Image: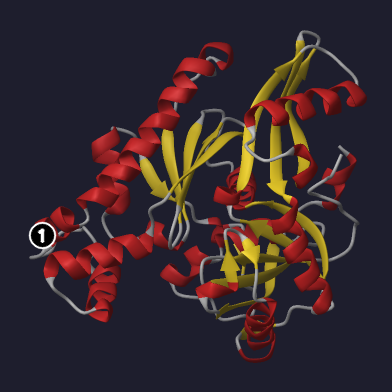
């Protein structure tokens, strides 16, 4: 079975490659001391570098990586070992329930599940799974799969850059790791919403990640809708979105009307995940969705969390891991910029011991 994750107990840095930008962060951990960022940075590249999740122009990624390390770092990244987030939209996740069985039988079962539900031949996939619950009655696990063409393109690019890839996983898994670190969901299930530039990932989290989905809408769409709806230049739309968003202002209702398609798509996507949990999981686990936790650069648009809280009648807040992850002597990014590093931080705190579970 192809495995998406392989670990060794040595320092690494987290990397999040998005639609047209990459974010990197290394976090130092020492017994009895807080997690501390020792280096972070971001760099941009042409969207044409990646097609359908595959790095097709590695020289553009290499150029962006060199710019990041040589010109855009705050602090220092000291490791060449990288834990990399994959776009959740380019992976497949599926919860499974199995009777008690050994590892070999589990491997056979997830192969059968992948053949039935994933629209890619098994020979073209890397498969992995995480056991989320186990007792004498059976096993619950999360099956994760990704196309070999995607993983191999990342692996080849990193090798050319003399980087050692040690972890590949969906970006929403990195977000859920931050949620677990924060303990913000306590014992109550929650919805994680990762608002990116071109897509938004939505996941059900109940002590662990249960299931994830992606909607093809994000910050870029919102900017486009503000441009068109208010007849602004793109830069004016970006400035308006970042400064006022859909919070109270003279243009509040006009902006809400302009981005209504994105707001409706987002609320419907969250409602779908809430229904999934209510119908399939809550009876066994005995809980109800208690809150919405937002991450990603698009989550900090003013007024968005308040809008979702009102529409969905659930407390909604932006995840802020920077109380437990400190910047030490480094200058702290602005609030908006801190949000874009959440996924990279989630990769940076991967515990090598997870490989032994």
Residue 290 visible in this rendered orientation of the protein: no
Q: In this picture, is 354 found above or below 68?
A: above
**Disc 1 crowd, CA 10 A, few/some/many (<14, 14-19, 20+):** some
User: Which residue occupies 79% across, 22% down?
Assistant: 109
Q: Position of residue 56 (x, y in %)?
A: 65, 70
Residue occupied by mark 1: 254
Residue 289 visible in this rendered orientation of the protein: yes
- Coloration of the structure image: secondary structure
User: Which residue occupies 56% across, 81% down?
Assistant: 331
- Most extreme residue toward the bottom is 71
- Most extreme residue toward the top is 137
Relative to the observer, which residue lies in front, 189 or 102? 102
Q: Position of residue 141 (x, y in %)?
A: 72, 27
Name the quadrant containing residue 324. bottom right
Relative to the observer, which residue lies in front, 251 or 55? 55
Relative to the observer, which residue lies in front, 25 or 216? 216
Q: In this picture, is 17 found above or below 267?
A: below
Q: Quadrant of the C terminus?
A: top right
- Label 1 residue SS: helix
| Left or right: 137, with 248 as reference point | right
Name the quadrant containing residue 245. bottom left
User: Which residue occupies 22% across, 79% down?
Assistant: 236
Q: In this picture, is 122 found above or below 342?
A: above
User: Which residue occupies 53% across, 74% down?
Assistant: 48
Q: State how many labels appear.
A: 1
Q: Quadrant of the N terminus?
A: top right
Q: Position of residue 164 (x, y in %)?
A: 85, 68
| Left or right: 225, with 97 as reference point | left
């Amino acid at each position: 079975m192809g495995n998406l994750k392989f670990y060794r107990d040595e320092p690494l840095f987290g990397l999040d490659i998005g639609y047209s930008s990459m974010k990197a962060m290394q976090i130092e951990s020492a017994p009895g001391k807080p997690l501390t960022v020792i280096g972070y940075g971001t760099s941009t590249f042409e969207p044409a570098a990646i097609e359908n999740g595959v790095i097709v122009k590695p020289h553009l990624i290499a150029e962006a990586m060199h710019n990041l390390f040589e010109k855009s770092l705050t602090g220092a990244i000291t490791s060449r070992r990288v834990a990399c987030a994959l776009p959740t939209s380019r992976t497949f996740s599926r919860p499974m329930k199995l009777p008690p069985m050994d590892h070999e039988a589990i491997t056979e079962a997830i192969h059968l599940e992948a053949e039935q539900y994933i629209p890619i031949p098994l020979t073209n996939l890397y498969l992995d799974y995480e056991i989320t619950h186990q007792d004498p009655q059976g096993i619950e696990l999360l099956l994760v799969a990704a196309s070999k063409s995607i993983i191999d393109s990342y692996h080849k690019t990193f090798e050319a850059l003399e980087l050692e890839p040690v972890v590949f996983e969906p970006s929403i898994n990195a977000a859920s790791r931050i949620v677990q670190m924060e303990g913000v969901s306590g014992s109550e299930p929650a919805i994680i919403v990762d608002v990116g530039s071109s897509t938004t990932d939505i996941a059900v989290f109940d002590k662990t990640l249960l299931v994830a989905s992606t909607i093809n809408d994000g910050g870029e769409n919102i900017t486009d809708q503000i441009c068109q709806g208010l007849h602004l230049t793109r830069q004016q739309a970006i400035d308006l979105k970042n400064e006022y968003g859909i919070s109270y202002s003279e243009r509040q209702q006009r902006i809400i009307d302009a981005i209504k398609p994105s707001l409706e798509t987002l609320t419907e996507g969250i409602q779908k995940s809430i229904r999934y949990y209510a119908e399939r999981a809550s009876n066994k686990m005995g809980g109800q969705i208690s809150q919405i936790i937002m991450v990603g650069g698009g989550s900090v648009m003013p007024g968005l969390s308040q809008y979702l809280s009102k529409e969905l009648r659930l407390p909604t807040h932006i995840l802020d891991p920077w109380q437990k992850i400190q910047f030490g002597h480094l200058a702290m990014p602005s609030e908006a910029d801190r949000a874009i590093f959440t996924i990279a931080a989630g990769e940076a705190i991967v515990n090598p011991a997870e490989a032994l579970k």
